[in-house]
Structure formats: C-alpha cells, structure tokens
Amino acid sequence: PEGGGGGQPPGPGDSAESPSERSQERTEAAAAPDQALLPPSLEDGGDHHNADTKKVTFPSDEDIVSGAVEPKDPWRHAQNVTVDEILNAYRQGCQKLNCKPIAKVLKQIQELKDLTQRNECLDLKGEKLDYKACESLEEVLKRVQFKLVDLEQTNLDEDGASALFDMIEYYESATHLNISFNKHIGTRGWQAAAHMMRKTSSLQYLDARNSPLLDHSAPFVARALRISGSLVVLHLENAGLSGRPLMLLATALKMNMNLRELYLADNKLNGLQDSAQLGNLLKFNYNIQILDLRNNHILDTGLAYVCEGLKEQRKGLVTLVLWNNQLTHHGMGYLAAALPCTQSLETLNLGHNSIGNEGVHQLKDGLISNRSVLRLGLASTKLSCEGAVAVAEFIAESSRLLRLDLRENEVKTGGLMALSLALKVNTSLLRLDLDREPKKETVKSFIETQRGLLAEIQNGCKRNFILAKEKEETDQKMRQSASMAEIATEDGPPTEEEPSDPALQKAGLQNQGDGEVGDGQSEKSSLLSESSAGQSESNYHTESMCGQSFPGIRSSSDLLRLSLR
C-alpha cells in the first residue's frame, strides 16, 4: 500500500508499514475488549436448550499456540542510519507516490548533525502539503525524531492531517507540534489529533491557533484531554470554542492532572455559559498555572463566575490574563473579594479594560490583602491622577510587587508625584512602565515637573534593582560559606545576569503596544548594564534616596497629602 515504502526493499518480517497497517493495530486493540462483552455463542455452550446437540471441543495443548510474532518496532529503520540514506529514502518515497520532493525538507535533511537524538526542528511552515506530500514525509519521520514539527499554515486537509498525526503518534516524532492556521483539518483530522494526544508519551506542547475546533470535532479532543497524558501546553486561540466546544473541553480538563498552560484568547467567550464553565474549571483543577483569556467577551457578569473559581485557587493558578474583556469598575468588586483568597496568583493582567479610577479604588484593598501578586498589568484602563494615587497606596504597602504596567493612561503631575513618593518607601518594585512622553498640562511648567518625576521613578526602580542584586549576592556568599567553610574565598561568586521573566511575556505584560516603558528598559538586567555605559550611581541619586526614611508615608492619606503638597 502507498505511503510506507522505505528506501530499501524490505526483507522478510521487515515490511514497511502503511497508514492502513498503522491504524489496523489500533482497530484490533480497540476491538479486543468488545469481544469479551459479547453474549455466549452456541459454540461456547451458551444455549442450554441445545446442549445435547452441540458440543465444545478444545485442541490439544501443543496445538493451542500455532505461532508467535514479535511486535513491530517503529524504530527499526532508524538504526545506524545516515543522512544520505534518509535523502534517498525520501526521494524514493516521493517517486513512488508520484509527488515532487519538498526543497525545504531536502535542505533540512542535509543539515542534520546528530541522528542519535532529537533534532531541533522540522520546519514545514508555509508549505502546501497535500495527501501525497504528507505520506512521503513518513520516510523522514520513521528515521529521525525532532523537538519541534512546525506545520503552521500548510493547508492540511482531513486526509493529510490524519496521515501526519498518525505518523507523529506512531514514531513519537515531536515534543512540540505547531498545527496553527490550518482551517480544513476537519473531523477526521481532529480525531487523529486526539488519538495522537492520548497515545503519545512525548508530545508536551500543541499549538492549534486559528484552527477551528467545532462542535463535531470537539468531543474527540475532550476525550483525549480527560486522560492525563503528556501534554503540558495547549494553544487554542481563535478556534471557535464558544458554546458546546468549551463546555466539553472545560468538563474534560477538570480531571486532567498534567496540563499547565491553557491559552483561549480570541474565542468570543461570553459572560454567561462560557464564563460559568471557566469558573467551574478553576474550582476543580489546581494544576493549570497559566490561563490566558485575552480578547474575549467575559464582561463583568463573566468575571463574577471566574472569580468564584479563583477563590478556590489557593494553589495552582499563577498567571491570569483578562486583557481586553470589556470589564468595568462594576466587576472589580468580585476580583477584590477573590484576591485575598488566592495564594498562588503572581501575574494579573487587566489591561485594555475600562476599569477607571473607581475600579482601581475597589481593587486596591484586595491587592493589599493579597500576598502573592508580583506583576500587575493596568495598561490602558482609563486611569487619571486619582487612580494613580490609589495605585501608589498599594505600591507603598507592598513588599512583593516586582512589576507594574501603567502605560496608556492619563497619569499627570499629581499621579506621578504619588508614584514617586511611594517608590521611596517601596523596596521591591523593579519595573514601573509609564508612557515616556509627559502628558499635556494647563500649566506649562508642569511638563518639566513631569519629566523630573519620571526620572525619579526610574531611579527608584534602579535603586531597588541594585539593592536586590546586592542582597542576592550576599545570600549567595553566605550559602557558599556555609557549604564550603574550609575554602577561603577572597572574591565573591561570579555575578549572574538577571534572567528574563518568561511569565511576563506569557501574561502579555512584556513588549505590548510597542512597549512605551517608563524606565526605558525592556529587561531588568539592562538596568545594570546602563550604569556601565557611562552613568555613575550618583546620577541615580541612589545614595541620597537610600539614606532617607519616610515613616510618615505609610498611610494612603499621607501619600495623598504629600502628593498634593
């Protein structure tokens, strides 16, 4: 049969398997349990009325087992294989299927280095893969494994998708699979994808953005997700999930123990049934760490459902993205009530919602009572100076907050003054994102005042970063001294670069909206690199700021009074 021919003629007991043979194994395995459920047949003696006329006989012991067949080894073709052998096998497979070899595939095969372990990527992005092109790829997949198989925008149809997913499952071809922007996978394609998700032990990451998962296909994927397989990250952005598909997926994920990241942006999820399903999911699943709901229609009514589930997340959810969900100040009360209950939430992104000053006032008390939030996104939330003062009160009270995004808000002189004062008592905030250019004021001199305040805020973040690095190095030296007391170390341990924060990017808090950043930095590590580029620490006013104490600004009333003064 077509699709499985190898580069060399198969020998006895080594026939190349075709898609039908791959699927036959699954059919036989699925049929086996059903046989046990059949009623007793006449030959089995089930009909007692004809017991006198029918007899059951068994063969002798030596004739019961007529033969034995070793199970097929998917990797028998990969033993001691060379790049030339893979090239020849792929070309011959294409010739047999009467299709043209893909130039991008030939080039990538030639560049393969180590065939004894997974290679980085099989990149097919943008190639038009019909059924024959997909079948010919088996000659590669049966000989080489990859970390990523990229099938983005490859115009897969049901037949081609089914064949490729069967191969990826059978040969454990990938740990990361990208099937995004394929709108014609169809029911049979999704059925094969679900079987792959359920059976493979290597697939950890599946990206199916912009690949519709409709009513007739969702049950297959839901059944696969009900089983705690190997999948850790699932992208289903813009997959048409609103309604029954989301209900099936959320119900299945209640029992899933392995999935850690779920991305559901751009699915037109509503504030009623869809949000209720998400709230129920959060009540039962404590393993999902990132839930991205950006660009949906959750509304304040839906936020109430989500927050009911959030109250149960004493451990589990780390990042919640509610960017652009038409939320208002009416919904912030639900969130403020849920925040003191959760002990794991570290990143909360509420950007591009019309929360306003009133909403931030309601949210403030919940944030102060919460002891886990490290990153807060309030970009483009209709804040003015009044809202900035409420945020400043939270900054002054917080000893954990690392990053705050206030871009695209009307924060003018009064609000900047409150933020600057708050940073003089806060020692944790490392990055405060504000628009770089001052806002228009009726009094022209306030423009320069804004510039000065922006510089003070930047310097306060830099001071906190330097103090955090010094504390980290001191702690590291103490740990080293405790573990290696017999070694006298004159020099301290080497200074490591501050690692980038992947949760910022995943939560949509990093480099959004062209990244107008108040401190002018895209990464926290660049705060130190800038000082080595010609500016001394005295220019940051670090010494004078560290030497001051502000015991009188520990309350919101004092902050407001000083900011107005």
Image: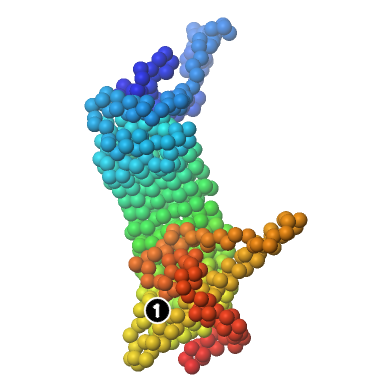
For residue 170, which quarter of the picture? Answer: top left
* Amino acid bearing label 1: Leu
Using the image as rendered, state which of residue 326 and residue 472 is in the foreground.
472
Q: Position of residue 503 (x, y in %)?
A: 48, 60
Within 10 angstroms of label 1, few (less than 14), some, or many (20 or more) residues?
A: many
The outermost residue toward the right is: 486
Q: Position of residue 452 (x, y in %)?
A: 43, 84
- Residue occupying image coordinates x 34% and y 58%: 266
Residue position for label 1: 383
- Residue occupying image coordinates x 50% and y 25%: 36
Q: Is residue 67 above or below residue 529?
A: above
Using the image as rendered, state which of residue 28 and residue 453 is in the foreground.
453
Does residue 503 appear left or right of residue 210 in this picture? right
Q: Position of residue 220 (x, y in %)?
A: 39, 41
Q: Is residue 276 above or below residue 205?
A: below
Using the image as rendered, state which of residue 247 and residue 315 is in the foreground.
315
Q: Is residue 468 visible?
A: yes
For residue 354, which quarter of the picture? Answer: bottom left
